[in-house]
Image (cartoon, rainbow, N blue to C red):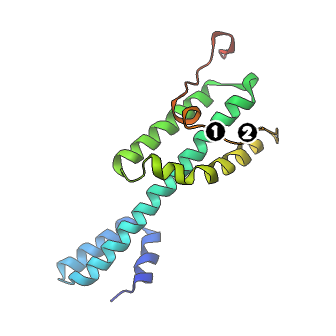
């Protein structure tokens, strides 16, 4: 019988292989061990979803920061990245409703700090004097190139 730590370790490898192992345990009528494996698998999947949302939120914030700090360098790729990150976050939230606005607000400051550092590195250490971003700036404002900003 595997321990909780062993199940957790397996979950870091392959969720698919873990599910196959659980299926095999069920076929062998080892219900209690399969239940422990299933609990670890669910926890691991939740961690992955939270990590994915956090990653997309940072990516989204980075591009909003760059958009605001370097208006002369705005590009369609930045606008596309903003839209793409928003869509990815919405997709994650559809699959995992608990990763809602309250969850995002709970990780907001940490993600913002990471985004500022990343944006500054991408902008070649140009200092951006943002102390925060609003929900509207990140999730609602439109980021499109004006006619005089259109790329060739």
Rendered image: mark on residue 7: none
Q: Is residue 41 left or right of residue 66?
A: left
Residue at the location (63% across, 54% down)? 110
Instruction: Say if mark 2 contacts mark 1, CB within 8 Å.
Output: yes
Within-10-Å neighbours for mark 2: few <14, some 14–19, many 20+: few
Relative image position of residue 152 (x, y in whole percent): 67, 14
Relative image position of residue 35 (x, y in whole percent): 27, 77
Residue at the location (34% across, 49% down)? 95
Relative image position of residue 7 (x, y in whole percent): 40, 79
**Residue farthest to the top?**
147
Residue at the location (71% across, 45% down)? 116
Q: Helix, strand, or loop for circle 2?
A: loop
The N terminus: image quadrant: bottom left
Q: Helix, strand, or loop for circle 1?
A: loop
Relative image position of residue 17 (x, y in whole percent): 36, 69
Within-10-Å neighbours for mark 1: few <14, some 14–19, many 20+: some
Rendered image: mark on residue 133: 1
Q: CA distance from mark 2 to mark 1?
A: 7 Å
Q: 134 or 27, which is in the foreground?
A: 134
Q: 141 or 25, which is in the foreground?
A: 141
Q: Is residue 36 above or below residue 91?
A: below
Number of numbered discs on residues = 2
Q: Is residue 124 left or right of residue 45?
A: right
Residue at the location (73% across, 24% down)? 71
Q: Is residue 87 above or below residue 4?
A: above
Q: According to the image, label 2 marks what residue? A: 130
**Residue farthest to the bottom?**
1
């Amino acid at each position: 019988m595997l321990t909780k730590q062993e199940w957790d370790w397996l979950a870091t490898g392959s969720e698919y292989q873990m599910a196959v192992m659980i299926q095999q345990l069920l076929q062998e009528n080892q219900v209690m061990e399969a239940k422990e494996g299933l609990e670890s698998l669910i926890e691991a999947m939740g961690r992955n979803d939270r990590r994915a949302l956090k990653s997309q939120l940072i990516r989204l914030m980075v591009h909003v920061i760059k958009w605001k700090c370097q208006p002369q360098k705005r590009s369609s790729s930045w606008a596309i990245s903003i839209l793409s990150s928003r869509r990815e976050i919405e997709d994650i939230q559809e699959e995992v409703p608990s990763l809602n606005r309250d969850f995002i607000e709970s990780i907001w400051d940490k993600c913002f700090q990471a985004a500022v550092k990343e944006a500054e590195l991408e902008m070649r250490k140009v200092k951006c004097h943002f102390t925060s971003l609003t929900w509207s700036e990140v999730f609602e404002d439109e980021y499109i190139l004006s006619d005089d900003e259109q790329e060739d």
